[in-house]
């Protein structure tokens, strides 16, 4: 995994983003934020198991499903199954060692 600090995210609310195989960070000091890095590593694993392109397709479709249902962009983001898994498990540094294939599936739905 490659971690890159980029000004690309400088003027956004995004702290980090996982774009396989890279994690882009808004601030250089975030490379020491274990919770944030673990969250993004969970996304990298999700991307791999969905062969990358299907992750992005699913992510966008699920985002718009929740956006049209909830009429709130932030809530739509928080309801995406990939995000729900990552937020739920980001504080567990050993999660990826025991995570089962397609674990995000149990986070689908409201």
Image: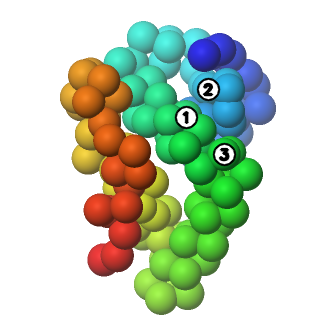
Instruction: Work out whether residue 63 or residue 6 is closer to the camera in this orientation and state it.
Output: 63
List the single residue furthest toward the bottom.
Answer: 69
Q: Position of residue 62 (x, y in %)?
A: 55, 71
Q: Position of residue 25 (x, y in %)?
A: 60, 25
Q: Residues within 10 Å of mark 2 (few under 14, many from 20)?
A: many
Residue behind mark 1: 44
Residue behind mark 2: 23
Left or right of 34, for residue 31: right
Instruction: Work out whether residue 61 or residue 10 is closer to the camera in this orientation and state it.
Output: 61
Front position among marks 3 and 1: 3
Residue 67 in sight: no
Q: Secondary structure at mark 1?
A: helix
Question: Residue 33 sits in which quadrant?
Answer: top left
Q: Residue at x 63, y 73 (%)?
A: 61
Q: Residue at x 55, y 43 (%)?
A: 49
Front position among marks 3 and 2: 3
Q: Residue at x 55, y 87 (%)?
A: 68
Question: Residue 42 sits in which quadrant?
Answer: top left
Instruction: Work out whether residue 106 or residue 75 is closer to the camera in this orientation and state it.
Output: 106
Q: Secondary structure at mark 3?
A: loop
- Labels 3 and 2: the sequence-earlier one: 2
Q: Secondary structure at mark 2?
A: strand
Question: Residue 28 sits in which quadrant?
Answer: top right
CA–CA distance between discs 3 and 1?
Answer: 10 Å
Q: Is residue 1 above or below residue 84?
A: above
CA–CA distance between discs 2 and 1?
Answer: 8 Å
List the single residue furthest toward the front.
Answer: 101
Residue behind mark 3: 51
CA–CA distance between discs 3 and 2?
Answer: 17 Å
């Amino acid at each position: 995994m490659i971690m890159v600090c980029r000004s690309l995210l400088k003027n956004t609310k995004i702290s980090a983003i996982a774009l396989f195989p890279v994690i882009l960070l808004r601030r250089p000091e975030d490379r020491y934020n274990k919770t944030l890095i673990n969250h993004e590593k969970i996304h990298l694993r999700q991307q791999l198991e969905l062969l990358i392109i299907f992750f992005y397709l699913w992510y966008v479709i699920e985002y718009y499903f929740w956006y049209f249902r909830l009429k709130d962009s932030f809530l739509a983001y928080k309801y995406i199954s990939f995000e729900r898994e990552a937020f739920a498990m980001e504080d567990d540094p050993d999660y990826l060692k025991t995570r089962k294939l397609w674990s995000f599936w149990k986070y689908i739905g409201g």
